[in-house]
Image (spheres, helix red, strand yellow):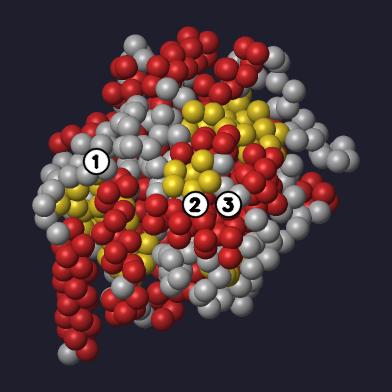
Amino acid sequence: MRYISTRGMAPRVDFEGALFSGYAPDGGLFMPEELPQLSIETLRQWSTLSYPGLVKELCTLFIGPELIPRDVLNGLIDQAFSRFRHREVVHLSRLRNGLNVLELWHGVTYAFKDLSLCCTAQFLQYFLEKKEKHVTVVVGTSGDTGSAAIESVQGAKNMDIIVLLPKGHCTKIQELQMTTVLRENVHVFGVEGNSDELDEPIKAVFADVAFVKKHNLMSLNSINWSRVLVQMAHHFFAYFQCAPSLDMDPLPRVEVVVPTGAAGNLAAGCLAQKMGLPVRLVVAVNRNDIIHRTVQQGDFSLSEAVEQTLASAMDIQVPYNMERIFWLLSGSNSQVTRALMEQFERTHSVSLPKELHSKLSGAVTSESVSDEAITQTMARCWEENKYLLCPHSAVAVSYHYQQTEQQPPSLPRCCLAPASAAKFPEAVLAAGLTPETPAEILALESKGTRCTPMRKGDDWTLMLRNTIEDISCQQRGHFLNALE
């Protein structure tokens, strides 16, 4: 399996090459050159698999045994999920009125990003140990990516991680999950800006190809193909858990509601759909509604500003994985994708070509949800089920409630739940409910913290470059000590 850039100007790479890259050298994102088509028979066979079993099958298709032998791959994936709190790793809660909530948050940091990042870190370690190499991982986060990335690589001897978090834009718990990890290989910066603003210095650093190469830099944001790959399993598992029976031909359809910010989970769903999984995708966003406007009107343009909402991890204006979706739905047309994205980068505003917009609105429907609807949904779900939703999960469930009020569901529907309500006590209180906080989250309050400020007026790109150079110096020191 080879990978190519959505912009068509970068050399082809194998899975290892895609794994160690952030953006492709031409500014695009890596995608598989061809997509395996799954037969009805294969889907029936997969339908009895556990969530880790599905991840193993998908990774086997997209990695290839010449890079990671099948038995080694299985071991890496088992290791990745070994610290999850639920024995199923991912669990479906069947609630009243046809509400199915797929809990993707049973990992260490109580968010769905643990699923893909734990696997990605295992794959990285495997290749790094084989080559005795060191990498520096650079991550920008709107809340959950940072803590899950830190958790997956903390203490690793051949990886350092730099995380930029938007000071005051995450919840207190999200921030503490990052700033209380005092390992030598973890470097956290608190940026006086939002998550789109902190992406700028990261993009600037990655644009310097020689610097990236010299310091072995990589990203673990959902620009990394490996994360999208693992996230495909969410859609397969949701489908198999909610489909009434697979004895029919054609197979029944299931609607999967995907709450999203940067559109990684949505890109994963579009890929699963293209491979033959009969899902109907609904993308649900908060008031930062660029994806909703793109689906509804073909209007891929920035608003005046990012709005702060209760679903803070989705407070994103630039959903970079839409580039993958444009490429996929334009029939892998890198010329169209490159022109669109270059115009967007120049003018912050693009109208999708008619044909592409029609493909997008055929593949995906969308909804934008207000803070008021989020708190009402959280309150209703508690009242009907004694079940606490996080505000991001409530964005998806709000769509379900809205639909069931209009008509009984024609298809089974599954709402993806990206995080535990335990991480968002502020939103739980705003919904008039009582937070339930696990002991390990309460314990964060009493831990020491470490976080370097990036203030307005500082040169953030220079600070980031200096930190990267310091890490490389230290690594050279360790290497020389080991030789003595």
Q: Quadrant of residue 295?
A: top right
Q: Residue at x 36, y 67 (%)?
A: 218
Residue 189 picture location, percent across and down: 19, 52
Name the side, left or right, on which 384 lies relative to 238. Answer: left
Q: Which residue is mark 2?
A: 321
How many residues crowd around disc 1 within 10 Å: few (fewer than 14), some, or many (20 or more)?
Answer: many
Residue 287 picture location, percent across and down: 41, 29
Instruction: For the residues labelled 2 and 1, say whether their Cβ atoms are less than 8 Å apart.
Output: no
Residue 462 picture location, percent across and down: 17, 65
Query: What is the spatial separation of the Cα atoms under label 2 and label 1, in whole angstroms?
Result: 24 Å
Q: Callout 3, which amino acid? A: Ile
Q: Is residue 166 above or below residue 132?
A: above
Q: Which residue sits furthest right?
A: 249
Q: Which residue sits furthest top?
A: 383
- Judging depth in this view, the residue of 450 and 360 nearest the camera is 360
Quadrant containing the N terminus is: bottom right
Q: Callout 2, which amino acid? A: Asn
Name the side, left or right, on which 402 lies relative to 18. Answer: right
Residue mark closest to the camera, 1 vs 3? 3
Q: Is residue 129 above or below residue 51?
A: below
Residue mark closest to the camera, 2 vs 1? 2
Q: Which residue is mark 1?
A: 175
Q: Mark 1 or mark 3: name the one nearer the start of the chain.
A: 1
Q: Is residue 404 above or below residue 244?
A: above
Residue 6 in view in this figure = yes
Instruction: For the residues labelled 2 and 3, say whether their Cβ atoms are less than 8 Å apart.
Output: yes
Q: Which residue sits furthest bottom?
A: 484
Q: Quadrant of residue 90?
A: top right
Query: What is the spatial separation of the Cα atoms under label 2 and label 3, in whole angstroms?
Result: 7 Å
- Residue 325: numbered disc: 3
